[in-house]
Amino acid sequence: MAEMEKLREMIINGNGKGIADHVVKLVDRGQTPGSILNDALIPAMDIVGDLYQKGEYFLPELLISARAMQRALDVIKPKLAEQGVKNVGKVVIGTVQGDLHDLGKNLVNMTLEGAGFEVIDLGVDVPPDKFVAAIKEHDPMVVGMSALITTTMPAMKETIEAITSAGLRSKVKIMVGGAPITSEYAVEIGADYYGPDSTDGKNYARDVATGKV
Amino acid sequence: MTTKERMLTALSLGQPDRVPVWELAFNEESIINIGKLLTADVPPVKLAHEMTMEEKLKLLELLYKITRELELDGLTSIHLFNRKIIDADHFEDDWGRISHVDRVGDAVTVKGPVAEPSDLKHLKIVHPQENEFLMLMASIGNLGKDVAQVLFAVGPFRESWSMMGGMENLFYYYKENPQFVKDLARIATDYILEIVDKGADLGADAVAISSDLAYNKSTLMSPRHYEEYIFPYHVEIVRHIHRRGMKAIKHSDGVMWPIMDYMVEAGFDGIHPIQPQCMDIGEVKAKYGKRICIMGNIDCTHLLTTGTVEEVEKAVKDTIAVAAPGGGYILSSSNTIHPSCKGENYVAMVKAARTYGIYPLEISG
């Protein structure tokens, strides 16, 4: 339908102005919130993620598209809850203790939300026990950790150790990312996955949700 | 050659008598870790803003002792904003920007005075104050003019997004309101030009313009956006630095390939730090070595932190072999010497540069 195609294009092109009104119009015309999410928002953000990975989009385009998607999602979120539409899965995410950087983490959050996940964002400078408490409270399938600076990398290892000590390690998949992190380091500290960028992180979470990993 | 002549020769793409060694910055704890290898008389490990004046002076004296004893060819002094302490982790500068300080002293701006374009009308324009250059004054007073004195200043991109309390807040306007992005860059650039003037008046030899434009994957913004929103201001700043008789260095982490041509075109004399995880220094040397001085590349993420002295020595040897032939190379870490870098490894890096970096080089890639 042309109106759904228009919504997809608005997200891909980062046209956030008027997007909320457009979604309201779609709902009024009988489009279900579930189909708006699954047939417009998620496919549009997948295209944005692909353009970003191909180097055609950079951070501004990614952020602007994600903001447009967020505005659309805000309209349908209450309706999704009302109608009992389940999210794809839950992800607990945070920047590890000692590290105050949040741009990378925020990009992953937006990308995951654009893929239909519920994201519990613990913020920055998150101590290991807060990750543990959040896993107990929210029962996520994936935990994401971010670190931008070398000096805070050990906090990732400490967080994984705390999750293991709490007996929760087998309940969650752990993905890590950030400038100094490598796949070798992820293996070394016992993480399940290293994501070079937000799209990779989303793809991994999707693989977990669909039982591929 | 004096250490300063060595630095300036390399920045002019010439070949000095040996590969110069310099760092963009050292954290407080890093200075103490290296200093401990030279003297027992070191200040306690604290962040500068937690130190007494006596401890701060001791820290600076230790940095100068390191510079003299290791014969570093240049020293960077940071333009330090006046800070009003809000609480243990936050401070506010004269622009009204609030920053959160982490445990190693690095600050992240979390709130700025500009939330939307209309705020520019009420923005109180700030001018750099003399006391913000005390580090440069002390460095020149202590080490004299034989060492290349580099002033570290924040670039127009970071100054702009700091005004908005975060990079993403600025990026949203790239599409929505290009004129606002340019107005903000104009304010930032005018401020930086004043910093450049202060540095020149005090006797700096070079200005290092920081603020990352790239990360592990690519540039943060597209080359088109760089050209529109940052490049003209870089050109203006570099021209001013040159007019004031100094050299201009651009620092940015990450994969800078998409905008490397612009770095040259803007007139930067040096590009730092060529992160080994992001760019191959041999390729940078081959493509840009005759047009811009290459600086850095000794890995401070893994090598200087967990590597052995032997591994550091090998990395320095290999890097000099590919980056130093013909001159136009200044050796430094791939970012800064942060507290996780071992003091022994830093000293090993400097010593290896002396072993393998004497011109004419006995090694080559």
Image (cartoon, helix red, strand yellow):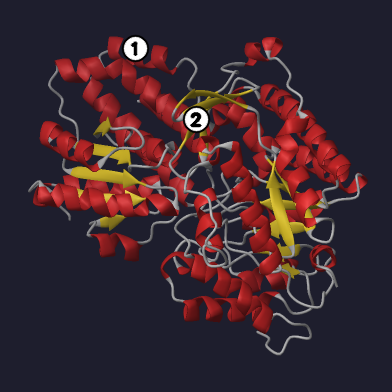
Q: Is residue B362 above or below residue A48?
A: below
Q: Is residue B56 left or right of residue A188?
A: right
Could you tell me how far apart the alpha carbons at marks 1 and 2 are, in whole angstroms? 20 Å
Quadrant hosting residue B71: bottom right
Q: Chain of mark 2?
A: A
Q: Pointer 1 and pointer 2: residues touching (CB < 8 Å)?
A: no
Q: Nearer the viewer, residue B150 or A204?
A: B150
Q: Which residue corresponds to mark 1?
A: A24
Q: Are marks 1 and 2 on the same chain?
A: yes
Q: Nearer the viewer, residue B88 or B303?
A: B88
- Residue A127, percent from left and from top: 27, 39
Q: Is residue A100 above or below residue B60?
A: above
Q: Amino acid at mark 1?
A: Val
Mark 2 secondary-structure assignment: helix
- Residue A123, percent from left and from top: 34, 32
Q: Amino acid at mark 2?
A: Ile
Q: Which mark is residue A166?
A: none
**Placement of the N terminus of chain B among the 4 image quadrants:** bottom right
Q: Nearer the viewer, residue A142 or B197?
A: B197
Q: Chain of mark 1?
A: A
Mark toward the viewer: 1 or 2:
2
- Mark 2 is surrounded, within 10 Å at the Cα level, by few (under 14), some (14 to 19) or many (20 or more) other residues, namely many
Q: Which residue corresponds to mark 2?
A: A64
**Placement of the C terminus of chain B among the 4 image quadrants:** bottom right
Quadrant hosting residue B210: top right
Q: Nearer the viewer, residue B178 or B13?
A: B13
Residue at the limit of the structure toward the left, as seen here: A167
- Mark 1 is surrounded, within 10 Å at the Cα level, by few (under 14), some (14 to 19) or many (20 or more) other residues, namely some
- Residue B107, percent from left and from top: 52, 37
Mark 1 secondary-structure assignment: helix
